[in-house]
Image (cartoon, coloured by chain):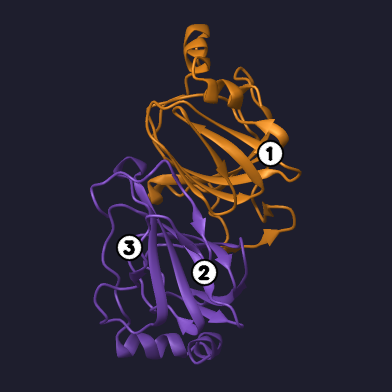
Chain colours: A purple, B orange
Amino acid sequence: MSETKPALVRASLNGYRWEEVPNLPYKDNASAPFKAVSRQVLFADPQLGCELRYFEVEPGGYSSLERHEHVHAVMILRGRGLCLVGEQVSEVQPHDLVNVPGWTWHQFRATGDEPLGFLCLVNQVRDKPQLPTEEELSELKSNPVVAAFLSS
Amino acid sequence: MSETKPALVRASLNGYRWEEVPNLPYKDNASAPFKAVSRQVLFADPQLGCELRYFEVEPGGYSSLERHEHVHAVMILRGRGLCLVGEQVSEVQPHDLVNVPGWTWHQFRATGDEPLGFLCLVNQVRDKPQLPTEEELSELKSNPVVAAFLSS
């Protein structure tokens, strides 16, 4: 985020973009496996204590399967998808709310023809995500619901 | 907010309501002048550092004209309206972003036939809003753009 203060009002542009908001790569490094995701930082004022980002997953795409100490608070904004939180797989659609507790494996997958777009709220101070080891992945896949989700 | 943890996924219901989310009065005390506003707290996990609320202003209604030290980060979710931030009056529509800096007078007004609904992000730790004194209100109204907004 630059030091420049954002305008008081930033208009929504066509296609889930915003004035003054750059469309960024999902990850700064591409070490984590993911597919067709973009990231936009909507609010990051230090006085808020948190940041609000908008992620968009193209049809057939998915966010990286990861976990971390910090929590996520998610609101779906467009499209349809499936999300994994822990061992729970849920269908999600616009305005559904998703809580990702700390240290909980999670992933979002876009199903259907439209991108899956969602707001994700995080604490300003947060740890780096961890990816599953081969062993952890095997353990996750021992649950058939999770296995079906991961191979969908 | 109760001590009970919210479900991992809370579905969006018809009419901008959510599973497990009570629809609350806008203000706990009605000392501030406002009209036809409701409030729903969507996320308030202490680990987030912030809270995400959804406010809805009925057609012809308005939030209270106030200011405070803490900042607001707003995303419009439904309807159309006008917002005052400082001395700037802006038309807003779905997905527009509004920054309300600290100590800045602000108010939202629903125009058109549909309610104006918006997400509002705030720090968990925040001061109480101040209402304008008669003198401050006169000063605000000395700007014809602000005067027109306040009487709209």
Q: Tell me what residue is drawn at x 49 percent, y 80 percent.
A: A58
Name the mark on residue A117: 2
Q: CA distance from mark 1 to mark 3?
A: 43 Å
User: Picture coordinates of residue B71 (x, y %)?
Assistant: 40, 36
Residue flagged by tag 2: what amino acid is it?
Gly
First in sequence: mark 2 vs mark 3: 3
Q: Position of residue A126 (x, y in %)?
A: 28, 58
At a point 27% along the width and 55% down the height, the residue shown is: A1
Chain letter of mark 2 equals A
Residue B11 found in image quarter? bottom right
Residue A86 is at least partly visible in this image: no
Quarter assignment of residue B102? top left
Q: Is residue A104 above or below residue B90?
A: below
Q: Residue at x 40, y 87 (%)?
A: A139
**Of helix, strand and loop, which one carries label 2?**
strand
* Tag shown at residue A69: 3
Q: Residues within 10 Å of mark 3 (few under 14, many from 20)?
A: some
Where does the C terminus of chain B fall, quadrant-wise?
Answer: top right
In the rendered view, tell whether residue A89 sits above or below residue B23: below
Q: Nearer the viewer, mark 2 or mark 1?
A: 1
Do the residues indicated by labels 2 and 3 lie within the same chain of the protein?
yes
Q: CA distance from mark 2 to mark 3?
A: 24 Å
| Residue marked by disc 1 | B111
Q: Is residue B115 above or below residue A67?
A: above
